[in-house]
Amino acid sequence: MKAIFITGGASGIGRAVALLFSARGWRVGLADIDDGGLAATAAMLPAERTSTYHLDVRDMAGWEEALAAFTTTSGGRLDVLFNNAGIGQGGAFGTIDRAALDRVIDINFRGVAYGARVAYPWLRATPGSCLLNTASASAIYGSAGLALYSATKFAVRGLTEALDGEWAADGIKVRDLLPGFIDTAILSTPIPDTNRTARDAVVDAGLEFTPVETVAQAAWDAVHGDRVHAVIGKTARRLAFAARWMPGRLRRMMRSGALGRE
């Protein structure tokens, strides 16, 4: 039986991916710091091939413990590590305090790097394995108002590309997801010094939300396909098109705040 370990499994994309892979016969390991959310996700899956782990992705020792425990249940297999845990951070970069800056970098990038490093021996030992990372459409072109978040997702994208080359000799595929805006808990993040959330900003800009089920199917396709990057949703596709074919116009739109109105 194939096995997938999912961070950020308590809700949103992680939960949707868990449901899809489980429905297709996979063993699922769910990791998060939200124990209640983990229990809720696990209750939706077959108990005999589902396990949960309290994991702060910033803790490398925690990674080692969780993956060792999960691979014990899977007979040593780790077909997919889905590095999905992440947090949002909107607002003007010049107003972000040190604690918030460190937290976003540590969770969104350091946690991904830790997961990849710790999982490597198990991925290498599992034929046809895949490291799958959640990046963002914000990793296609730097997003004004999301500078720190965007930077961490560019880092995830860069790590994905580098490891896809570096680990090819080990038979490990490395892929990432670049979705547009997903209506999950991450959009409830308050924008500093305002009474608004990231969700409010998306709605005001007239941008669309991509269903988590669409992202889950894209995750399945990424694991089983050949493309390193999966661009998901109308907003992400528009951004990718503009970045490739109209970079000057995209820059002007980003500088004027007009991206969501065009």
Image: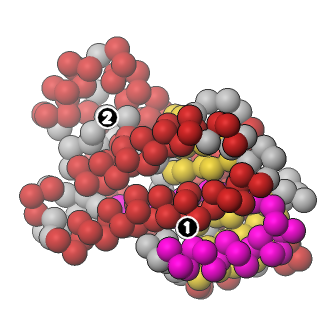
| Disc on res. 8 | 1
Earlier in the chain: of badge 1 and badge 2, it is 1
Q: Quadrant of the N terminus?
A: bottom right
- Residue at 31% x, 34% y: name it: 141
Colour approach in the figure: secondary structure
Distance from label 1 to label 2 (Cα)?
A: 24 Å
Q: Is residue 130 visible?
A: yes
Q: Residues within 10 Å of mark 2 (few under 14, many from 20)?
A: many
The magenta region covers 60-88
In the image, taking residue 210 as reference, residue 66 lies left or right, namely right
- Residue at 10% x, 63% y: name it: 95
Extreme residue in the bottom direction: 36
Residue type (three-letter) at the residue carrying disc 2? Tyr
Q: Secondary structure at mark 2?
A: loop
Q: Quadrant of the C terminus?
A: top left
| Disc on res. 186 | none
Residue 64 is covered by the magenta coloring: yes
Q: Secondary structure at mark 1?
A: loop
Q: Residues within 10 Å of mark 1 (few under 14, many from 20)?
A: many
- Residue at 49% x, 64% y: name it: 114
| Disc on res. 141 | 2
Most foreground residue, 178 or 54? 54
- Check the image and report above or below for 99 versus 185: below
> Do the numbered discs 1 and 2 sit on residues whose CB atoms are within 8 Å?
no
